[in-house]
Image (tube, grey):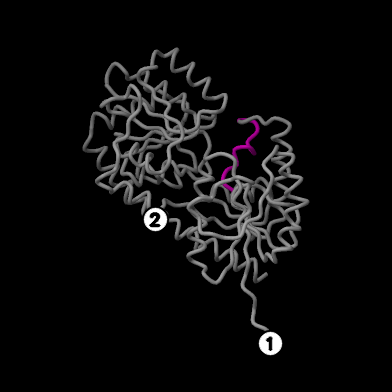
Amino acid sequence: MSPRKTVRVALDARFRVESGASTYVRAVIPRLVQAAPDTEFLYVRYAGQSLGGLPEAPTIEAPLGSAARDLVWTNRALPKALRRRGVDLYHGLKLYGPLRTGVPMVHTVHSITRSRESEFPMSPRQRAIHEYGNAVFKRSCRLLGVSQYVSDFLVDELEIPSEHIRTVHLGVPGHFREALLRPDRPVFGAPGLGDAPYVVCVGNVERVKNHATAVRALARIRGSVPHHLVIAGRTDKPAAVELRRLIDSEGLADRVHLVGFLDLATLASCLDGAELQVHPSLSEGFCLSVLEGMCAGLPIIGSAIPGIVTVLGDAGLTLADPFDDRALADAILRWIEDPKEARRAGERARAASDAFTWERTAQRTLAVYRECLAS
């Protein structure tokens, strides 16, 4: 009898912009490789896409073009490439994979924002891609929901059998925790910030992140406290233009700082220098930004939505109405004026963050691979 061949898994690591999902790609792949030395991994990536820092592995290159071109290549060229490479299982880490591969498919589902069309209207192109994604999900061997909220949505709204879904939480990388402890860590700074105390809000500037409520909350208390607001996240979408208009109209141009996307080392310094974190988001699958703030020991005020409550639990404050800037302002003042209670909340948050590690994410993901290969 010939020996059983090494299992070969294709990890679709394609992403176009940095986000929570790209953090997932960069964090989970090394842990998968480390935890499964007998498995051969290969990556699917865009031509020219940097996967620096990941373990070396064979790659399949996809052309970087429009979303329509992406779908054509994914369904015509990718299945053939997977067959040529002898792949046993395909895992879409962020993007939708092909409708058919000839091998078991696993997809990680990060968010269901685009499924809530009454709140977040889609263009015809977005709707078509969304419907395609739903079709891919229904053909997958397993779906990994990043929270129970996402998993429940897949069952309740897309009517995917619950036995095909596993909830696998995300984590905080060890080197981020290490960066927070480094004595030689650089001090975070932004033009106009100086030595002023600040509140931080982390997330790409999109309407769903609801940064406007944080700005309005600061406007309510600016005469009572010297604090600034630092917003860390990409600013390349129309929502950033709207947010800047709001900042100007509130007379807060010198108190609100949009500092762009921060790498993990810089983000660690930014969080370490903040007094507290706010996250009034309207929708999250699993809120990595809140988890990173918890890891930094920050007291956190977030929306009472499942993707935040899953992570934060009772280690911080959650607000029922994410648009209630008065309630957010009151909560910020409460902790600024009671630093001892804020410090205790930060300690609870840091302790709670220990439950979420990328090593655990990788182990649970590998267990799903074994389920699919066995079936």
Residue 46 location in percent, x, y? 63, 46
Q: Are marks 1 and 2 in contact (CB under 8 Å)?
A: no
Which quarter of the picture shows residue 82? Answer: bottom right
Task: Inspect the image, locate mark 1, and give the three-letter code of the amino acid beneath it.
Answer: Met
Which one is in front, 315 or 285? 285
Residue ID for mark 2: 355
- Magenta-drawn stretch contains 47: no
Q: Which mark is residue 1?
A: 1
Q: From which residue to which does the magenta span run?
A: 109-119
Residue 188 location in percent, x, y? 32, 34
- Crowding near the residue tagged with mark 2, few <14, some 14–19, many ≥20 C-alpha atoms within 10 Å: few
- Magenta-drawn stretch contains 115: yes
* Residue located 35% across and 24% down the image: 191
Q: Nearer the viewer, mark 1 or mark 2?
A: 1
Q: Main secondary structure of the magenta part?
A: loop
Which one is in front, 64 or 32? 64
Which quarter of the picture shows residue 226? Answer: top left
Cα–Cα span, label 1 and label 2: 44 Å
Seen in the picture, residue 70 relative to 358 is either above or below; the reply is above
* Residue located 46% across and 27% down the image: 211
- From this viewpoint, which residue is outermost toward the front? 48
Element type at mark 1: loop
